[in-house]
Amino acid sequence: MPRFVTIILVVTFSALAGCERQPTRTDTQSVPKTKLMSQRLSYDDSCRLLQREELIDPGDIPPCPKRPPRHDDEVLGVSFFRSELADAKLEHLTLPRTFFGRSEIRGTSFRGTDFSESTANWNDFVDVDFSSADLSRCDFRACPFQEVRFVGALLVGADFRHCSFEGCDFTGADLAGAKFTKKAAASLQLSSEQQRVIDWQADDGDEPEGG
């Protein structure tokens, strides 16, 4: 199946602190704390890979925001807005605080990628693999998930209110402090430990902005 990608990238070229810009690790450099971290490209190298794949504009590396992005921010780093991302393999990258909005992500693998503190409201995720990804403190509100794999993913503090799930797999995922309603999670096969550490919500609360 051919890959079809339409991406609108919102960037600024003024420098912002927030993501540590590290050179590509060599054998003479210190080994990161975990094997998974050692497999990930640095933020800069991750963006260069996206440029080579023609998923973001060539040129300067987009800045990484200091905080989780919002739909109305004038400054965004890597951003997928009103986009279609299909059949892509974007594994073991470092892309924290990425913005996804009103997009469809289908048949794509983000295995082992760091998307911590990203904002991803009002998107459709279909047949997506987030296995072993760092999705801590991600805002996934108002997203339907179909056949999405979160196996072994880090989902500490992630927000899944206003979401629906069909055929999703959370085996071994760390759900400490993640926000779910019991109605939305009824179809999920969660362990007793996962159920114990979830931050269960009585209702979905207000819808996220930008819808």
Image (cartoon, grey):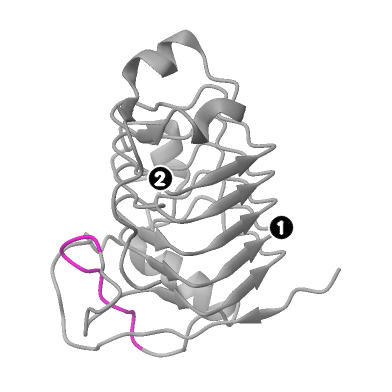
Q: Which range of residues does the magenta coloring cover?
A: 60-68
Q: Main secondary structure of the magenta part?
A: loop
Q: Is residue 67 left or right of residue 52?
A: left
Instruction: Give how far across and how far down residue 28 sits, in percent.
Output: 34, 45
Foreground residue among 22 and 183: 183
User: SS of the residue at dot 1?
Assistant: loop
Foreground residue among 200 and 1: 200
Q: Quadrant of the C terminus?
A: bottom left
Residue 119 lies in what quarter of the image?
A: bottom left
Instruction: Give how far across and how far down residue 55 sits, in percent.
Output: 55, 79
* Residue wearing tag 2: 27
Look at the picture and state if 178 lies above or below 80: above
Please, what is the three-letter code of the amino acid marked with disc 2? Answer: Asp
> Which residue: 34% across, 49% down?
138
Instruction: Give how far across and how far down residue 84 sits, in percent.
Output: 62, 75
Cα distance, mark 2 to mark 1? 34 Å
Residue extending farthest top: 192
Q: Which of marks 2 and 1 is nearer the N terminus?
A: 2
